[in-house]
């Protein structure tokens, strides 16, 4: 099976298909801090209608925006379509392995989160991979919104 070149731009169709097809998104590295970029992305994706599952191992952190927080991917009690990662690139291969174990279909590394080994792990398991992109930004490209059946 050929691997994608994740240094090249992804096609609009590829990103659009992912954002249209996934419903449940586990966000690894979700933060309760409203000033953090990950909080804003979680908020927007949740308000857009995705079933968001914050993942953060911090002791005592029970919920973010009223959503139950899970300490890791394996502890999530329902199927996950996409794993979105706000962590250091070095952490991505281990997260990719866990995403494969829970049967996720997409591994999405946030802007700045890029790791070739992680991409191979996920792609070898048949997952689709996006790295170094922000779903919030991709979701709100104006020419996509009608195709995603969202109001402009």
Image (cartoon, rainbow, N blue to C red):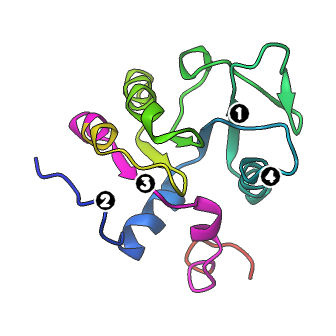
Where 89 sits versus 101, above or below? below
Marking on residue 131: 3
Say if mark 3 contacts mark 1, CB within 8 Å: no
Q: Earlier in the sequence, mark 2 or mark 4?
A: 2
- The answer to if 129 sits in the magenta stretch is yes
Q: Earlier in the sequence, mark 2 or mark 3?
A: 2
Q: Quadrant of residue 51?
A: top right
Picture coordinates of residue 64, whole percent (x, y): 84, 34
Q: Earlier in the sequence, mark 4 or mark 3?
A: 4
**Which numbered disc, 2 or 1, marks the residue closer to the eye?**
2
Q: Secondary structure at mark 1?
A: strand
- The answer to if 139 sits in the magenta stretch is yes
Q: Is residue 150 left or right of residue 39?
A: left
Q: Quadrant of residue 97?
A: top left
Q: Which residue is mark 1?
A: 54
Q: Residue at x 45, y 23 (%)?
A: 102
Marking on residue 43: 4
Neighbour tally class for label 1: few under 14, some 14-19, many 20 plus, Cα within 10 Å: many
Picture coordinates of residue 35, whole percent (x, y): 86, 51
Distance between mark 2 and mark 1 Cα atoms: 25 Å
Q: Residue at x 46, y 29 (%)?
A: 95
Q: Which residues are magenta?
A: 121-145
């Amino acid at each position: 099976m050929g691997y994608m070149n994740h240094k090249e731009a992804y096609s609009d169709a590829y990103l659009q298909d992912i954002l249209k097809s996934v419903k449940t998104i586990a966000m690894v590295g979700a933060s309760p801090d409203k000033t953090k970029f990950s909080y804003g992305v979680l908020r927007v994706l949740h308000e857009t209608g995705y079933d968001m599952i914050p993942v953060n191992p911090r002791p005592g952190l029970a919920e973010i925006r009223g959503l139950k927080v899970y300490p890791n991917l394996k502890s999530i009690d329902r199927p996950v379509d996409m794993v979105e990662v706000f962590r250091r690139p070095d952490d991505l291969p281990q997260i990719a392995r866990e995403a494969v174990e829970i049967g996720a279909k997409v591994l999405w590394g946030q802007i700045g989160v890029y790791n070739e080994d992680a991409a191979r792990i996920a792609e070898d398991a048949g997952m689709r991979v996006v790295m170094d992109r922000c779903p919030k930004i991709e979701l709100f490209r104006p020419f996509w919104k009608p195709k995603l059946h969202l109001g402009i």
